[in-house]
Amino acid sequence: MKYKILLSLTLFFVIIFFAATIILAINYLPQQAENLFGPADSKLDFSQRLIYSLRLLASQNQLLGIGYQSGNPIEIVINAGESADQVSKKFLQSGLVVNADAFKTFLIYSGLDVRIRADKYEISPGKNSIEIAKLICELTPNVIKFIILPGMRVEEIAELLPTSGLKIDPEEFIRLIKNPQTQVMREEVKGLNSLEGFLYPDEYTISRDTAVNKFVEILVNRFFDKITPEIIDGLHTHGFNLAQGVILASIIQREKILKDEGAIISSVFYNRLAKGMKLESDPTIQYAVGSQSTGWWENHLTTQDFKISSPFNTYLNIGLPPTAICNPDLNSLQAAAFPAKSDYYFFQAKCDQSDGHNFYETYDEQITHLCH
């Protein structure tokens, strides 16, 4: 009886030991492989990552050791369509790597097996397998993420281009947006003097070699993917076509901070337009006087700024400015199409430094509640 109890306890502890070892290995091996060889390809599932990590660690001396240590550079030609297996064997035959299977494993583990560049290479001595793999592979992804934030004007978007990875000239982009007639456009935007307002704020996944015309087309198409027939009908109900609605939405976008204030801010502008009053919107002045040197959205406007002779100066001109002043999001477009019902003609930022606004029916009320 005592023998059976002792045997059972021994078996129990052996099982616990092996289970702990397996758990430790599952957690340790991928991390150790990542420390030595970099992160695994995100397309690998957990079991694949574990298996490839184990293989890499078992071959780490061969991968990190130098196969070809001295002599003249060796010329290697990789042809289009050659697989990771074919390339690995070619490098083994040349003496540049010492283990073709380990080399191929690293390519697959790191996701480089699908980014091998066909070309003629001269591989100098003194490189290990990891360095060679990175030399023959396109390490820069073919696509990039490009983010346009709500309320950005075309110049702000252009400033993102040089560091985005896209091969698009910012000045050419701006010229195309402000002179859209120079390219074939979809029917809905033909005849517009500017595409400002139609560059939908969103996150885009775009090929690095996208041409500027195609880039603009992608942004404008996203706008029309987001705009709904109900929004267009809402604008028509208030006597606006789509372009006019986008202009109003762009002003709302720059005026509001709180999402739920869009519709009531919209009502103020509709009320003013119905009375033949000037919109008197500060963001339109900011758009008119904005520059790269002073800031595209100058917060501290001067008396002279409000006197600027510009079609965007809504303190001098009645009605909407000639184009949008920024690129509005869906919430602002909805606010332009579906304004709240109100008797307000004035609004100003709250004095408590919050993001909200106070709304007034008369100018005297607004003056009474000016912040001091």
Image (cartoon, grey):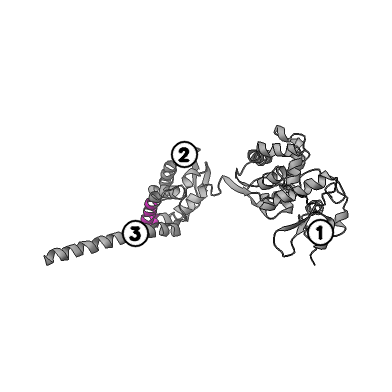
Corner quadrant of residue 234: top right
Distance (Cα) linking label 2 and label 3: 38 Å
Residue behind mark 2: 82
Mark before the other along the chain sequence, 2 or 3:
3
Which numbered mark, 2 or 3, is in the foreground of this view? 3
Quarter in which the N terminus is drawn:
bottom left
Magenta extent: 50-62
Is residue 339 among what the camera can see? yes
Which numbered mark, 1 or 2, is in the foreground of this view? 1
Residue behind mark 1: 366
Q: Residues within 10 Å of mark 3 (few under 14, many from 20)?
A: few
Is residue 72 among what the camera can see? no
Distance (Cα) linking label 1 and label 3: 68 Å
Which residue is at a point 54% across and 47% down the rendered structure image?
138
Corner quadrant of residue 86: top left
Residue behind mark 3: 23
Q: Going by the image, does 330 lie left or right of 134?
A: right
Q: Position of residue 166 (x, y in %)?
A: 64, 46
Mark before the other along the chain sequence, 1 or 3:
3
Disc 3 on helix, strand or loop?
helix
Quarter in which the C terminus is drawn:
bottom right
Disc 2 on helix, strand or loop?
loop
Which residue is at a point 18% across and 62% down the rendered structure image?
8
Which residue is at a point 46% across and 39% down the rendered structure image?
82
Mark before the other along the chain sequence, 1 or 2:
2
Membership of 238 in magenta stretch: no
Corner quadrant of residue 62: bottom left
Disc 1 on helix, strand or loop?
helix
- Pick whichever, 242 or 94, lies toward us: 242
* Amino acid found under the numbered disc labelled 3: Ile
